[in-house]
Image: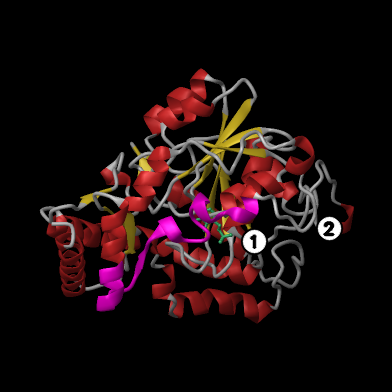
Amino acid sequence: MPGMEFFGAAERKEINDVLETGILFRYNHEAQRNNIYKAREFEAEVANLVGAKYAHAVSSGSTAVLCALAAAGIGAGDEVIVPPFTYIATVEAVLMAGALPVFADIDETLCLSAAGIRRVITPKTKAICLVHMCGQMADMDAIMAIVNEHNLVLVEDAGQAMGASYKGVSTGLWGKTGAYSFDFFKIATACEGGIMVTNDETAYKHADSYSDHGHDHVGSNRGMEQHPVLGFNYRISELHAAIGLVQTRRVPEIIKSNNAHKAQLMSALANVPGVSFAQIPDANGDSATFLNLLLTDTDSAQRTVAEMNAAGVGGFNYWFTNMYHFINQWNHIKEMKTAAPLAIEKLGAPQDYKNLDIPIAQSVIGRLISFGIRASWTSEEVAALAMNIEAAVRKATLVEA
Ligand SMILES: *Cc1c(COP(=O)(O)O)cnc(C)c1O
């Protein structure tokens, strides 16, 4: 997750542009801002990077997902298919929108699978919130076939896959709307920030208004602007946008280094017994922020994790026991522990979240260890990591023999 590796002079320069004028707010103040509009530039940079007609910057990746849902027309009582393996923000956004999450199974792409989706589709299914996990992408040909067959709304949470693509089309642009995160751990960071993308003008306008109390942003008198739809405040500041702008420019180089490091790791580990890799539906479109290793079973993966911890090998995630990325630990959702009642508590949950039938997710996530790839690594550092991984796997699998 390399954005944070590259905070430097270019970021400081863009922040200083904003500090020079003191206009930290993205809208209005035309006379004082000296034509400095970092949020607008940030949006144009992201739109250009991914090939979107429209991009709208907001306060976080989480609020970008919420805006993407609202702008796609998903709200109260709508059943939305979601994956059980994702950053929890996806599911939270569906719940905060008043909609009802329906969990479906995944496959070795680490994303929702067509087969998993088919098993939970009902006439009540309104949308799929597809998440492209660990820098990779879902199998879009199979997903689009179902979306079209059942006339579903597709919203993409590409929070950890900005810059990734499938057959030349960026993640985030397959559906009606999409979302990227610029939090501190993503491929590009604004420290806090997010971007909603779409090729649909109405969806863009709704996101633009929804994220700023309904403002239509026409004219130069904020207090007299029209409010075509109800909204709330999910605005980004000019300071965060300034950082996101520079970091977005760095993404093509980061993706190049990431892919070189990932290829080196995969070839070094290709012949290690018991090791395989998550499936990458389009290897040419990988943003390669993670090396996603699959062990033969959950026990071997957990023993490998223990060996790596003992040897001091850091920089990896074992999502199966992570509190925020896998449903097994989401007791607050299963028991609906809320500060105040959500729509789902009045409408009723569409599934029993304590007894979901997601066997492939249980097996694949149990076997998965993801190593965060740093773009700034040297090839010696990559080689050393591959050796450490191999040593840990060999020790862990010796126990079995
Ligand atoms: C990071 C992430 C988010 C949330 O982004 P924030 O900017 O941290 O709010 C949402 N979805 C996915 C898949 C993510 O990885």
Disc 1 marks which amino acid? Answer: Ser
Residue 259 image position (x, y, % from top left): 26, 57
The front one of 369 and 384 is 369
Q: Residues within 10 Å of mark 2 (few under 14, many from 20)?
A: some
Q: Give the spatial CA distance, label 2 vs label 1.
A: 20 Å
Residue at 52% across / 50% down in the picture?
327
Residue at 69% across / 33% down in the picture?
78
Which quadrant, please, contains the C terminus? bottom left
Farthest-out residue, right:
224
Residue at 58% across / 67% down in the picture?
192
Looking at the rendered structure, the number of numbered marks drawn on it comes to: 2
**Residue 119 showing in the rendered view:** yes
Per the image, label 2 sits on a secondary structure element best described as: helix
Q: Quick check: 192 left or right of 307? A: right
Label 2 beta carbon less than 8 Å to ligand 1: no
Q: Residues within 10 Å of mark 1 (few under 14, many from 20)?
A: many
- Residue 21 colored in magenta in the image: no
Residue 193, quarter of picture: bottom right
Residue 394, placed above or below residue 217 = below
Q: Quick check: 229 left or right of 17? A: right
**Residue 44 showing in the rendered view:** no
Per the image, label 1 sits on a secondary structure element best described as: loop
Residue 85 image position (x, y, % from top left): 47, 48
Q: Quick check: 1 left or right of 293? A: right
Residue that badge 2 annotates: 222
Residue at 45% across / 28% down in the picture?
144
The span shown in magenta is 306-333
The front one of 48 and 329 is 329
Q: Quadrant of ligand 1?
A: bottom right
Residue 298, placed above or below residue 82 = below
Label placed on residue 59: 1
